[in-house]
Amino acid sequence: MEKQNPRELSLLHSGEFPNQNSSEADGARDESGDHVEPPSPITEMDFFSKPNQPHDHHQESKNLSSSSFDSDVNRGLNLLSSSSGVSRTTDEEKPKAGMNRLKIELERLHQENRGLRSMLDLITGSYNELQGQLLMAVQNQALQNQREKKHAVMNPRTWAALDVNEPSAPDDRTQDLSAPQANTAEVVSKEHDRRMIQIPGKFVSVEDGPDQTCQSQGTTKCSKVDQSNNEEQVSEVPFRKARVSVRARSEAPLMMDGCQWRKYGQKMAKGNPCPRAYYRCIMAVGCTVRRQVQRCAEDKSILVTTYEGNHNHPLPPAAIAMAKATSAAAAMMLSGPTTSKDGLIHFPNSLSYASTMAALSSTSAAAPFPIITLDMTQGPNGIPFFRSPPFAATFPLPLHGYHPQMSRHPMFSPHKLSALLATQLWQQPASMVETVTAAIASDPNSTAALAEAISMVIGAPTSNINGGNNNSPNGLPTLPGSPQLPQSCTTFSAN
DNA sequence: CGTGTTTGACCCGCGC
DNA sequence: GCGCGGGTCAAACACG
């Protein structure tokens, strides 16, 4: 836990403040409240001086988090001690010379640091651009296939709506998807009045229209409310209603996900003795993200957290990680029922659109929106899902590489697993589970952060989460010792 | 006193 | 039309 903080901060710098010089970065770090020591060449060096080629975020993150961190620290210490030792023991009349050497070295390191940062930013930008293009291609393919197979889909309302918007959708979608750092759920829902532009780590609401009613109440009401926006709203409904459900074993009453939540309701759902709690995000006014928290009826150690909506505010790193991961899954799901004629992703079972929530609540009616489930309950020994609703898109997300126990298992080497899943994604018509898992695995940054965040949450003592009760679902103010952000540790929002 | 939770009432969609 | 169930609202309440 402790070692994760520098990594989090370093990634935050590179991702969110790419244009800042070193002094600004130091200032930002200080503002975070996590590091109070003055800027030093050691701290600068720690995060960015790794000579390895930053071929991707995941690798970079791991390098920075584990061995490189310690080695960098040692190097900094050696540098400092050697120089100071020389000045004290050999020639005390040459402190200025030593200082000059240190300054020169410091300047050199700063320049190297800047170079590495810019390189990382370039790579990040390219990666995000490619990700957006991938999503665009997948969605366009999905739209085409839906036009051809409209009669065969599970959710006729959803795809009929897409057809209505058919003429204008491709252009808008293309433009939106080309935005950097395309958070898929953001992308998916952004053709609405509520347009979201996502800069790395930031969500900016371009037009936060008064569509709350439409969002929560569906197509019919939207069309009544505003005929002029009928096309747009009709097109947006199926996407916006996408939900991502995270199943994780946890004794904690809530899953800390990096966001602040306010409870606004609780209901007893049919078929489940455990009440379902309703939360809405309160990190920003007007944020429409909501989540439902409920324990699994069959196994009360499993906590099911379902997210819906799009954040309209910057997210803390943990929240970004989960948002990206879950939204990637959601987007993959939403673009799912495509064929693999040209090598694109294929979901062999179009029934994957059915509702997980229906299964969770034992209702008979399928939800009018796709729900995708991230199943964190599967152990490293390959135990099958505890429960996989027959028509739900459930896929396991083992905390490979980040849980100490799992990391010892050869199958859970992050490199192997990610590579394997990515291979399945691109080279063969994978099963739905494999495909969706690959969707997440294909974003190493998201996967790593997701796994880490969840492992932190699950592995953390209950007392560290919300003080051990459910009185404050937002973890922000209640985790005094937490290194990173204003305490909160996970979020998985999809969106 | 401010903030967040609890909980009963209400609204809406859906199936019969 | 009616009942059921999910989701939301808002007054009452608890807590620091």
Image (cartoon, coloured by chain):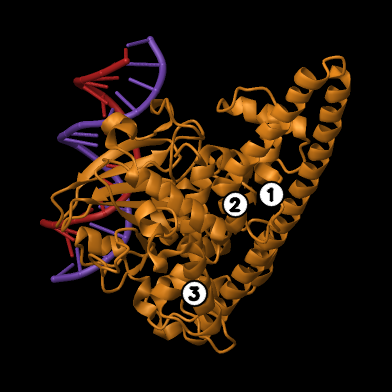
Chain colours: A orange, B purple, C red
Whether pointer 2 and pointer 1 mark residues with C-beta atoms closer than 8 Å, the reply is: yes
Whether pointer 3 and pointer 2 mark residues with C-beta atoms closer than 8 Å, the reply is: no
- Specify whether residue A225 is in view: no
Is residue C8 or residue A54 the one in the foreground?
A: A54
Is residue A240 or residue A349 the one in the foreground?
A: A349
- Identify the element where label 1 is drawn: loop
Q: Residue furthest front?
A: A90
Quadrant hosting residue A71: top right
Gap between marks 3 and 2 measured at Cα: 21 Å
Is residue B13 or residue A306 the one in the foreground?
A: A306
User: Which badge, 1 or 3, is on the more N-terminal residue?
Assistant: 1
The residue type indicated by label 3 comes to: Leu
Q: Residue furthest bottom?
A: A341
Label 1 environment density (alpha carbons within 10 Å; few <14, some 14–19, many ≥20): some
Q: Residue beneath label 2, please?
A: A63
Give the number of the disc on residue A420. Answer: 3
- Identify the element where label 3 is drawn: helix
Q: In the figure, B11 relative to B3: above or below?
A: below
Left or right? Give the position of A277 relative to A307: left
* Residue for point 32% across, 63% down: A380
Residue A321 on image: x %, y %: 51, 50
Left or right? Give the position of A82 relative to B7: right
Which callout, 3 or 2, points to the residue nearer the camera? 2
Q: Residue beneath label 1, please?
A: A50
